[in-house]
Image: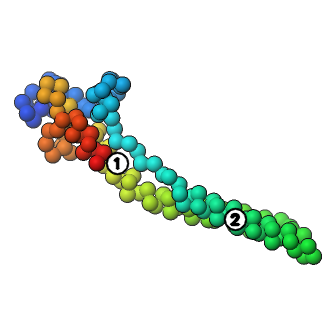
């Protein structure tokens, strides 16, 4: 017994884990088709926006401090204010970007578990598994995994 039996014929000698095909036959058309789901990417839009806002706030404070010709010179107590002016909007942007990415990360984890538990029958050219409702062609499995 090599693995779980194919649901179409009950044969267990032709079943291989999809993840093993991907690792062992990398570059082949089948392995490319049975690749794991892509990991969601953080675009960082709010991080960039926070950085821009922080840079503008920092520039404004530097100009404001520099234009006070008759005021006290800049001292070390001003440094934390300048750092906070840049960092706080940037950190808020990071938090927002990560919060927006959470649902996609959860979906990715579910898809990755499904991919990892899937099996391929070399005799019938179908993918099946505990998280796959019914046997599907590799093309259909890939579409379901990414859709």
Looking at the image, which is closer to me, 23 or 125? Answer: 125
Mark 2 / mark 1, whichever is N-terminal? 2
> Given this view, does label 2 or label 1 mark the residue nearer the observer?
2
Q: Position of residue 29 (x, y in %)?
A: 30, 26
Q: Within the image, what quadrant is residue 6 found in? A: top left
Q: Which residue is mark 1?
A: 109
Q: CA distance from mark 2 to mark 1?
A: 38 Å
Q: Quadrant of the N terminus?
A: top left
Q: Residue furthest left?
A: 9
Dots 2, 1 in contact, CB < 8 A: no
Q: Position of residue 108 (x, y in %)?
A: 35, 48
State whether residue 130 is above or below residue 58: above
Q: Position of residue 136 (x, y in %)?
A: 17, 38
Taking the spot 75% from the left edge, 68% from the top edge, the residue there is 60
Horizontal side, residue 78 vs residue 134: left or right:
right
State whether residue 22 is above or below residue 51: above
Q: Which residue is mark 2?
A: 56
């Amino acid at each position: 017994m090599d693995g779980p039996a194919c649901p179409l014929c009950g044969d267990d000698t032709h079943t291989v884990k999809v993840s093993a095909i991907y690792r062992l036959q990398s570059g082949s058309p089948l392995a490319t088709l049975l690749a794991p789901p892509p990991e969601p990417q953080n675009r960082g839009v709010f991080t960039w926006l926070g950085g821009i806002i922080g840079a503008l706030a920092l520039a404004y404070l530097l100009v404001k401090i520099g234009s006070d010709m008759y005021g006290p010179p800049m001292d070390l107590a001003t440094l934390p204010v300048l750092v906070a002016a840049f960092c706080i909007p940037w950190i808020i942007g990071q938090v927002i970007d990560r919060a927006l990415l959470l649902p996609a990360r959860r979906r990715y984890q579910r898809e990755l578990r499904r991919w990892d538990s899937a099996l391929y029958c070399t005799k019938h050219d179908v993918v099946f598994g505990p998280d796959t409702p019914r046997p599907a062609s590799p093309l259909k499995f890939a579409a379901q995994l990414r859709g």
